[in-house]
Image: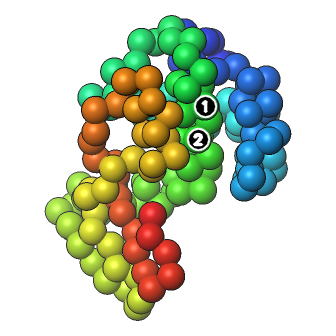
Amino acid sequence: MAIVVGTNSWVTLAEADTYFSTRIGSAPWDALVDSDKEKYLITAYNWIYYDSAFNVPAASTETAVKYGQCEAALFLISYYTDMDKHDAMISNGIKRFKYGEREEDLGSITKPKTVTDFFGSVGLYSGGVAFFSVSNSETDY
């Protein structure tokens, strides 16, 4: 399915490419073909639009909303597979586990600050939980 602004995206592919052209750490986005970029943008839209912690009209034209969707897409590029695995564990009743130095509490952290800050800046985010949290001796997500 292609991007349809106001239906399954707040941002066009061209706008997302422009946003990422000046963002540090956008290499995962840059490595994708356009059809995959569209899939991540649509998935990011759904991830936010259907989350009750966000109150974003489907046809929002706010720049902060567009940038927030881009940030959500970038997060999903890097962590979607982990999120899917964590969602399966949550569905099976697992709330916490430790593997080596990596320790996880499932379902206890808000969506990434890089996403929520954009929506919060225009009053469209009230708080909520994401799918998982990750921590180890060097990194917290």
Look at label 1 and name its amino acid: Tyr
Above or below: residue 5 compared with residue 19: above
Q: Does 103 sit left or right of 1 as displayed?
A: left
Identified at 50% across, 34% down, the residue is 118
Res 119 → quadrant: top left
Q: Is residue 34 depicted above or below 134 in this figure?
A: above
Q: Residue at x 62, y 46 (%)?
A: 74
State the residue position of label 1. Answer: 67
Which amino acid type corresponds to the residue marked 2 in the rendered image? Answer: Glu
- Tell me the residue at 74%/45% (across/down): 23
| Element type where label 2 sits in the image | helix
Q: Residues within 10 Å of mark 1 (few under 14, many from 20)?
A: many
Residue behind mark 2: 71
Q: Nearer the viewer, residue 31 or 67?
A: 67
- Report the front residue among 139 and 84: 139
- Indicate the position of residue 51 as horizontal and vertical percent values: 32, 31
Contact between labelled residues 2 and 1, with CB atoms less than 8 Å apart: yes
Distance, label 1 to label 2, CA atoms, is 6 Å
Please identify the quarter of the rendering in which residue 78 is found.
Answer: bottom right
- Percent of width and height locating residue 66: 59, 25
Quick check: 42 left or right of 106?
Answer: right
Q: Is residue 35 left or right of residue 111?
A: right
Which dot marks residue 25? none
